[in-house]
Amino acid sequence: MLAPMNASNDNIVALATAPGIGAIGVIRISGPDAFEIVNRLFKGKDLLTQKSHTLHYGTIVKEKKIIDEVVLSLFKGPHSYTKEDVIEISCHGSHYILQRVMRLLIDEGARLARPGEFTQRAFLNGRFDLAQAEAVADLIASENETAHQAAINQMRGGFSLVIKNLRAELIHFAAMIELELDFSEEDVEFVSRAALTQLITDLQTAIEGLIESFSLGNVIKNGVPTVIAGKPNAGKSTLLNALLNEEKAIVSDIPGTTRDFIEDEMVIDGVPFRFIDTAGLRTATDQIEAMGIERTHSKMKEASLVLYLIDLASDTIKAYHKQIQDLEKTGVPFLIVGNKTDQAQETLKNIVASDIRSVLITASTKDNLVGLKTKLLEAINLDRFKSSNTIVTNARHYESLVNTKMALGQVIAGIDGQVTSDFLAMDIREALYALGEITGEITSEDLLDHIFSKFCIGK
Amino acid sequence: MLAPMNASNDNIVALATAPGIGAIGVIRISGPDAFEIVNRLFKGKDLLTQKSHTLHYGTIVKEKKIIDEVVLSLFKGPHSYTKEDVIEISCHGSHYILQRVMRLLIDEGARLARPGEFTQRAFLNGRFDLAQAEAVADLIASENETAHQAAINQMRGGFSLVIKNLRAELIHFAAMIELELDFSEEDVEFVSRAALTQLITDLQTAIEGLIESFSLGNVIKNGVPTVIAGKPNAGKSTLLNALLNEEKAIVSDIPGTTRDFIEDEMVIDGVPFRFIDTAGLRTATDQIEAMGIERTHSKMKEASLVLYLIDLASDTIKAYHKQIQDLEKTGVPFLIVGNKTDQAQETLKNIVASDIRSVLITASTKDNLVGLKTKLLEAINLDRFKSSNTIVTNARHYESLVNTKMALGQVIAGIDGQVTSDFLAMDIREALYALGEITGEITSEDLLDHIFSKFCIGK
């Protein structure tokens, strides 16, 4: 089913800014009567005679009582976010005022918007496709440079373009195959089966690339899962605290934008790292949280990366080699962190330093944390993040891509098994359907409701 | 010292909306270079050629990377909040984006605004007087209708007008007295001492009215301090929960504007009530929080009102009379709440009902909570709140008014003691000074810094 181009006949209102006390709070109203509704409450210029994209100062008045002095932003459809008539009311940011003004708008005939409903209207009115609309929520939620860049590229249509190009190629071949159906009596082949196989294989490769990028996309959104491990007293909690305290100072340097600090997340050069089960690490002493090899190993398996601390001051060379062997057995990428360089045994230090996977630090004095961070970024293969390749960050898109891949696999199996054009056409249509779901060329109301309900209110 | 009309030569920036994730977040920049600074980061129309009070869609770009799609609101001084050039940048409401855009603005030469600095500039540039500026902070903090109305009246100059009128009368007489000084050799009286005494007495009455209104103003801001008292098992916690749960449902009926519910505050008909030391009331059972008569009595003295519960089911008539006698001794206004009407002893019930200060309820079934609320509003003398008289809500204004009153007292004492004109003039000047501090006609930088530092950032 194609997304309906339905002009909404009702007017929705919501708080567009974060809840809480601020200098200003913005209430947004969208719909065919937005101007009339606000005009009835606004004392100032007659809004109905004003141009789009203008600002107007005045008061919101009810029964001769002034509720607030406000500034209105007028957007006439289609030159607005929703492509409908939109007014943004910039009030003083008090809970009482914002609630009061919203209530007045509702009394005048607007209704409260559902979460994501403004963006849903923008999508339904053709402002952008579904993948772009979804990126709006990602953009608002993005907490680091990499996630932000992925979201903004997707919002501006980068990802959609990739999908549309793939789909266009498939549509072209689908058309040819369907044409064969019309001439099926004559047993002609408009499409060389070899060429089709080649195309489908190319498409599969492209789609596999996108599917693989999802593990990156996931990391971008949720952070690289990282475990700090090592023997008791190797300095694990000292290291974690050193890394996080530095991060804390960076995060909160602009007042008014501070947020709850994520206790176990750290952003290095735009890439987020998330430390697994580190709450105990910080509060407990190293001895106490020596929770037994098995538990540590099972944690390691959740990790994309292990920072393994070696105590250069007191470990033996034999024990060191044993630890590295154990580490290699886990199969998880790791970084050897030689700690306590200031009290290091010279031989052990040289042995550790000679391993290309190692970095030497002193956690207690924060010595060479910079070197550790560089190594961290190398270890997770930063280039994957910095490439201009499109990254899939959305689980729904991932699922559609997997479905596309399966359908394409059936097309190839069909060609190999020399099935007739009509069966091929059916499989190609399935692949087209799965791809079309991503950008919303194929969609259903249920799907839309599901997607937009995850948005925040007011967007 | 008069407030200097200083044109600021630097540009200030701050987040204007509440921190946290929202659909949009607004960054505000004010100063002589606001347009140039934003123009260097904005890809869209050339801002320098645009008109005031217009909206512009475009992107914020740094090193060819798009940071966000934004809408700019342009305000050219003096037609702006600060009377300087102002731009409001409406971004997607992500912490990352808002911090990034603010940082870019700072890199381009703006600096972070101090708390209240936008309003301080508005004051210094003559947009409003000091009392009006202070009302902006009150308005944002207002959590109920009464506080909101007091703040908006003050912001719109109602309070300032009262002060200015009082001051104008004083100035008129001061001028006459000063004239006498010029002719002091000739021992003339331009001002009849009887007329002066009458004027000063009238002013004192007016100022005493304002001083008295401060206890109301305080209540408006902080709630009527109320204690729920009564014997163990009288139903105190049941009543408090019944009242608060109802309130909770009202407060949170518009999503997106919900705030942390103030656990011990309740608003009835726009008037806030604050329950003292009720945390224990709600968690503990009645038995446990029977904390001893003395402690209850000391709490009562903090209260403006006591709701005293009588258990109609099990109290004796003798005990009832004893309790009421004890209550009367405290001197605190109280309301007798006969609880458990559903199981009431008929005689006791009739005795309680016959007291004009009483109301009968059943807390457990929420029966007659409406009656209780009406009685509550009566008990605190609602008319005081609903009067159109000016209410002083600000401790600084209160202090200035007290100083004015003292100076006026000295004037009268001087007249009575037949002091010379120059002494009278000095005392009148002192009264003028104290009054002038309220609206900022008399001010100092220290005072301004103190006032505006209590504002939220971005205002």
Image (tube, coloured by chain):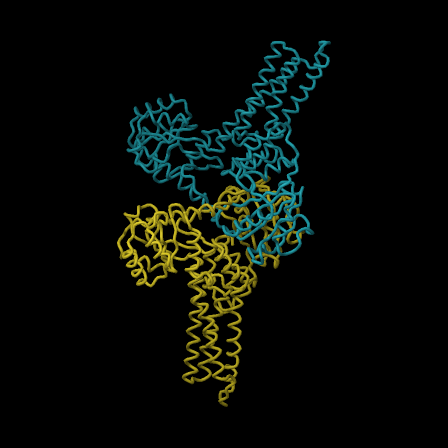
Chain colours: A yellow, B cyan
Q: Position of residue B292 (x, y in %)?
A: 30, 27
Image coordinates of residue B36 in percent, x first then y, are 65, 49
Whether residue A394 is visible to the viewer of this picture, yes or no, is yes
| B76 or B114, nearer to the observer | B114
Q: Total label count? A: 0
Q: Is residue A92 left or right of residue A240?
A: right
Residue visible at 44% across and 82% down in the picture: A415
In the image, A228 versus A186, the foreground residue is A228
Res A142 visible: no
Going 46% across and 82% down the picture, which residue do you hit? A422
Q: Position of residue A176 (x, y in %)?
A: 52, 81
Above or below: residue A1 compared with residue A22: below
Provide residue B46's location: percent of width, then percent of height: 67, 54
Q: Residue furthest bottom?
A: A186
Residue that sits furthest to the front in the current view = A346
| B158 over A170 or under it: above or below | above
The relative height of residue B355 versus residue A379 in the rendered view (above or below) is above
Q: Is residue A241 left or right of residue B406?
A: left
B448 lies above or below B416? below
